Image (cartoon, rainbow, N blue to C red):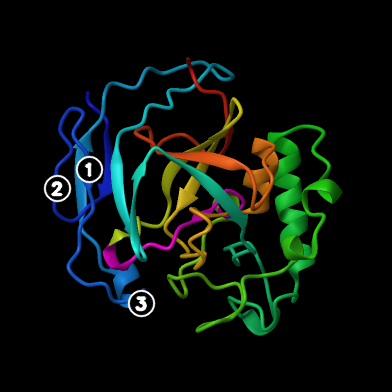
Amino acid sequence: MKKTVPVLILTAVLCGSAHAQINFDSSAGPGFADALASQELVIPAPEVEIVKEGSPASCEGYPLTMRLRGRTVTLPATGVWTLESHLATHKDAFPDKRSFPKSVRENISGHLANSCDLLSRLVPGADCAEVYSSRWDKEWTPPENGKAGQGALGDVRPSNEEEMWIFNMMWVGKSMPKAGTKFLATYKGKSVVVVGGYERGPSSRKFIGGFQKEVLWALGARQDSSKVTLSALRDQTLPPGPVTCAR
């Protein structure tokens, strides 16, 4: 049976090697309604061979053009990425049964402990003190127009497993992918399955987008200087995190 992969587009159909083109009519800035309103097209994917645990995964991609604020980017695309702060997850707990923290530091230690536990299981020997070494690694996303730790989707929170591998781009309107859509980040022979659609940014055009610290660490890349490649990903069953791709 053919497996299918949901991909967000507005006015184009991917066929063979053709581009999946994301278009829109308005240049208005991002908004909560934009993030939730989307159209979904199911694109047939090739047969995915079931591989044994530890075997290389199929990291096949396809051309995908997305509209960002003031520009368009066609994947695969290579550029400089910056560091993003943390988003609150389903697993994070706050006083008074709140879903989000009141400040950029409230219970961030609990979030990092959960992430460290997951990271240590994915990458045995991972040094969490090294991974979360800067002050920006120990803060929630600033409140801006919402709450601390809250992304572009408002009350929609990622799972703990997703949050560690989230990436952002300054998507405009409906070009923002559905929350949880997976892409592939590569740098110097290393690959990480990353998750998009929860947050927008950064605003600076110096950067193609932003990664969580775990992504940069797993790739061995430096924020604000390393040129990482982002690709669309056909196999949406791959778990987020480091992956060994079949050659």
Label 2 is placed on what type of residue?
Ala
Give the residue displayed 22% in from the left and 26% down from the top: 2
Label 3 is placed on what type of residue?
Gly
Q: Position of residue 48 (x, y in %)?
A: 34, 22
Helix, strand or loop under label 2 = loop
**Magenta region:** 163-174
Do the residues under discs 1 and 2 have CB atoms within 8 angstroms? Answer: yes
Rendered image: mark on residue 180: none
Q: Position of residue 122 (x, y in %)?
A: 68, 35
Label 1 is placed on what type of residue?
Ala
How far apart are the two marked residues, 1 and 2, measured between alpha carbons?
A: 6 Å
Q: Which one is earlier in the sequence, the residue at label 1 or at label 2? A: 2
Helix, strand or loop under label 3 = loop
**In the image: residue 224, left or right of residue 236:** right
Residue picked out by circle 1: 20
Q: Which one is earlier in the sequence, the residue at label 3 or at label 2? A: 2
Q: Is 211 above or below relative to 217? A: below
Quick check: is 64 in the magenta stretch? no
Q: Position of residue 178 (x, y in %)?
A: 35, 56
Do the residues under discs 3 and 2 have CB atoms within 8 angstroms? Answer: no
